[in-house]
Amino acid sequence: MANGSDPDVVRIFDTTLRDGEQAPGIALTRAEKVEIAEQLARLDVDVIEAGFPVSSEGEFEAVSEIASSVRGPVIAALARVVPGDITRAAEALAGAERWRIHTFISTSDIHITDMLRMSQGQVLDAIREGVKLAVGYTEDVEFSAQDATRTELDFLLECFRVAVDAGATTINVPDTVGYAMPHEFGELVRTVREAVPEHVVISTHCHNDLGLAVANSLAGIVNGARQIEV
């Protein structure tokens, strides 16, 4: 497990129980989720993303049991920048020794227009209010800009600045559709690193559609990322 005070240590954020369960054919029982979380704790991962509590009652119960029983790693729960999501995540995590709310919204033009049907200004407002609400529950708040690698750069940086100003302590750069090349992704991470305060941890979340998730993650580390989501 990484020393949180060391700026050169790379933290491992394991999302098997959330993103991993979205793989075709995977449907874990609550007991299986708890068993996996316990094994991840034995492996000394830094953060376990236990699930997406608002998505179902079963998911909420699984996250709650993991939060109450697994010790060592930070236990995280995913939430959109929506008050109901964030409150539900906080409720599920209440029994954890150390916990994090991981909140997100899409930031690419195609997602904003066709999926969210929002303006950029509305997205910024949602980030600001969502992160502020999450910080009211815990000081450990991560913000992800979904589809970051297809987001217009100036707007992406503005999203991250708003999140940090609202209290986010970790900023995640997801390659949601597995679109990026390593040199491009490394440059993006370096630009983000230079745009936010030094105390903020930069994270990467790379998908393997082109077989480049590991290469992109390593490019992120070289350029300042200090958390890798796997």
Image (spheres, grey):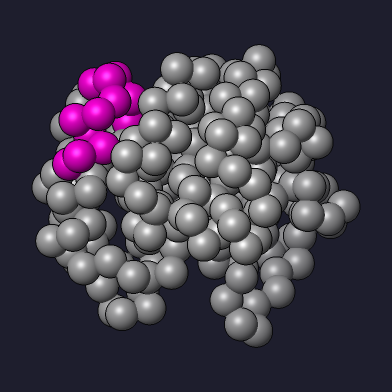
Q: Is residue 44 visible?
A: no
Asked whether 185 or 3 is in front, the reply is 185
Q: In which image quadrant can residue 82 be found? A: top right
Give the image location of residue 72, x and y in percent.
50, 34
Q: Is residue 213 left or right of residue 61?
A: left
Q: What residue is drawn where x is 60% and y is 28%?
A: 125
Q: Residue 209 vs residue 59: left or right?
A: left
Q: Nearer the viewer, residue 36 or 214?
A: 214
Residue at horizontal 80%, vertical 36%? Answer: 84
In the image, 26 versus 162, the foreground residue is 162
Between residues 105 and 227, which one lies in front from this camera angle? Answer: 105
Quadrant occupied by the C terminus? bottom left
Q: Which residues are magenta?
A: 190-201
Residue 207 left/right relative to 23 = left
Instruction: Identify the residue at horizontal 68%, vertical 64% (top origin).
Output: 32
Q: Quadrant location of residue 68?
A: top right
Image height of 196 relative to 28, above or below: above
